[in-house]
Amino acid sequence: MTVLRRLPLGFACAISVVVLGGCTSAPVVDLSPSPTPDAMSIAEDTLDAYVQVTTAVGMDVGEKPERPTAIATGDELAQLESAAESWRDLQIEWVGERSDTVETAEFDGDSIVMLYCFDSTDYGPQNVNGGDVGFEHGLRQFSATLVKTDDAWVFSTRQVTGDPCRTQPVEG
């Protein structure tokens, strides 16, 4: 050990790395609780899932009406199931590019209340034969209530507010 004391510190550490297998300390474990997601991020994730499922149901003319059970409950689930049945009966499919943007989201007890903008400028329903169904394209603001189920956050209610969207689409 006398030899190591006379060697430069860097050289001593290099030797100990080879001999002892490293100069590292034990891994640091963070014991603090994970941060709770905020209402906005939950609303954005839930809206993304909602858009994916409703777009898929709209594209397949409502042929798989069980899909909405993954993203809705209560009144909203009943509305989606009814819509899918109507699309199937009337042979309506939804086509184009849609855009949905969360504008506000706040916790309200065990639920989240949000406003979002549905931009259907380039998206809408048509008859499977290509016929127009008289849909008015544009921006619509919706209010929605999200609730937590055992599996995920889902829509429980959703309705058009009649107010203009707070966010406007970005012109490209």
Image: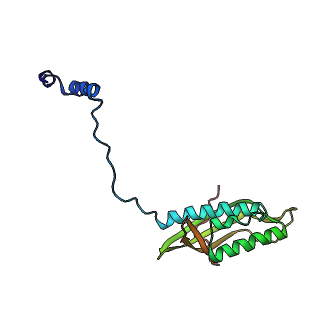
Residue 148: image location, x then y, percent: 53, 70
Asked where in the image residue 89 lies, by quadrant, the reply is bottom right
Seen at 40% across and 58% down, the residue is: 34
As displayed, is residue 15 above or below residue 130? Answer: above
What colouring method underlies this structural image?
A: rainbow
Asked where in the image residue 171 lies, by quadrant, the reply is bottom right
Does the image show residue 122?
no
Residue 141: image location, x then y, percent: 63, 73
Instruction: Name the quarter where the N terminus is drawn.
Output: top left
Question: Is 20 placed left or right of 35 in the picture?
Answer: left
Asked where in the image residue 2 lies, by quadrant, the reply is top left
Does the image show residue 82?
yes
Question: Is 36 placed left or right of 53 in the picture?
Answer: left
As displayed, is residue 32 above or below residue 139? Answer: above
Question: Is 36 placed left or right of 90 in the picture?
Answer: left
Seen at 22% across and 24% down, the residue is: 11
Seen at 72% across and 72% down, the residue is: 81
Q: Nearer the viewer, residue 4 or 120?
A: 4
Instruction: Name the quarter where the C terminus is drawn.
Output: bottom right
Q: Nearer the viewer, residue 74 or 8?
A: 74
Question: Is 58 placed left or right of 41 in the picture?
Answer: right
Seen at 60% across and 61% down, the residue is: 48
Q: Residue furthest left?
A: 2
Residue 42: image location, x then y, percent: 52, 64
Residue 51: image location, x then y, percent: 65, 63
